[in-house]
């Protein structure tokens, strides 16, 4: 089973690239941000909690996110693997994720980290904020806060995966097509087993 963690700060292009890679390699795309926004749209209790936190650029509690992932992994499906976008996001989530995958006789294959300059992140999110309807894209202060939280709580995962020999930095500046090509090449180099390509 191929388990790709697509990593990077807010606006790095995780969602954009995850959709393209999922199609290319026939993977199931799991985005915790998308799952939480669906809970908000469905007006569930979890959605109400999530909305308050997401709008301020804060994280949803680890246990909530981990149980969301657990229920997704339990769903029986025929796939060669998964691409995780926006998860794990804290060291506690990464440890819980490793335990969960071990229970499923699986493990994280590789962590691909999109490297993008801060000003480019802010510009992309501002631009998306004009049309996305995402409250967390509207204010510069909220965007900067999301980037600060990434640096404080999420970036330490680089060391976590590096120590397991699974960290692969990928340049995230340039056109979407160039970045996809780079990611595909890295996945094909790293993954020596045959992948069903659509
Ligand atoms: P989430 O939805 O994961 O948001 P995020 O990580 O802040 O990142 P984005 O989705 O904004 O950026 P992205 O890297 O996916 O880039 P994208 O492809 O969209 O999480 C939202 C919130 O949910 C969190 O703040 C938190 O509150 C909560 N949450 C989620 N997961 C959680 C977890 N595990 N634990 C706790 N809380 C959690 O691209 C951005 C824009 O740039 C787009 O407009 C795109 O078109 C454009 N773009 C992409 N690539 C390029 C390029 N190469 N050139 C120019 N523009 C580009
Ligand atoms: Mg995203």
Image (tube, rainbow, N blue to C red):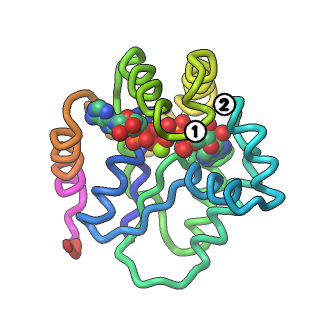
At a point 36% along the width and 68% down the height, the residue shown is 27
Q: Is mark 1 within 8 Å of ligand 1?
A: yes
**Residue 47, x across and y down, in percent:** 75, 54
Residue 180 point in image, percent of width and height: 22, 46
Dot 1 alpha-carbon crowd within 10 angstroms: few under 14, some 14 to 19, many 20 or more: some
- Of all residues, the one furthest to the front in this rendering is 131
Please state if 80 lies on the left or on the right of 11 as rendered: left
Asked whether the residues under the numbered discs 1 and 2 touch, taking CB atoms below 8 Å apart as contact, a structural biologist would say: no
N-terminal label among 1 and 2: 2
x and y percentages locating residue 60 in the rendered image: 73, 43
In-image side of 22 versus 161 (left or right): left
Question: Front-most of 56 and 165?
Answer: 56
Label 2 SS: loop
Q: Quadrant of residue 71?
A: bottom right
Front label number (1 vs 2): 1
* 84 to the left or right of 91: left
Q: In which image quadrant can residue 26 be found?
A: bottom left
Nearest to the observer: residue 127 or residue 115: 127
Q: Secondary structure at mark 1?
A: loop
> Quick check: is the Cβ at mark 2 less than 8 Å away from ligand 1?
yes
Give the crowd class for mark 2: few <14, some 14-19, many >=20 residues within 10 Å: many
Would residue 67 be seen by someone viewing this image from the given angle? yes
Is residue 189 within the magenta segment? yes
Q: Which residue is mark 1?
A: 134
Residue 20 among magenta residues: no
Q: Which residues are magenta?
A: 187-193
Q: Is residue 154 above or below residue 140?
A: below
Which residue lies under the disc numbered 2? 57
Is residue 94 positioned above or below 151 on the image? below
Residue at image location 63% in from the left, 22% down from the top: 142
In this picture, residue 137 sits left or right of residue 41: left
């Amino acid at each position: 089973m191929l388990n790709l963690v697509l990593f990077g700060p807010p606006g790095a292009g995780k969602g954009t690239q995850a959709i393209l890679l999922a199609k290319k390699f026939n993977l199931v795309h799991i985005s915790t941000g998308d799952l939480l926004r669906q809970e908000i749209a469905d007006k569930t209790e979890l959605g109400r909690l999530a909305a308050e936190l997401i709008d301020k650029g804060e994280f949803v509690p680890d246990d909530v996110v981990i149980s969301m992932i657990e229920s997704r992994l339990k769903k029986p499906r025929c796939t060669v693997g998964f691409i995780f976008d926006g998860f794990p996001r804290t060291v506690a989530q990464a440890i819980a994720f490793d335990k969960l995958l071990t229970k499923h006789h699986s493990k994280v294959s590789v962590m691909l980290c999109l490297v993008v300059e801060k000003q480019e992140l802010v510009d992309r999110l501002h631009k998306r904020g004009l049309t996305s309807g995402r409250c967390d894209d509207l204010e510069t202060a909220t965007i900067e806060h999301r980037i600060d939280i990434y640096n404080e709580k999420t970036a330490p995962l680089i060391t976590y995966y590096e120590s397991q020999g699974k960290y692969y930095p990928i340049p995230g500046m340039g056109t979407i097509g160039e970045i996809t090509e780079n990611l595909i090449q890295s996945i094909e180099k790293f993954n020596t087993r045959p992948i069903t390509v659509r």
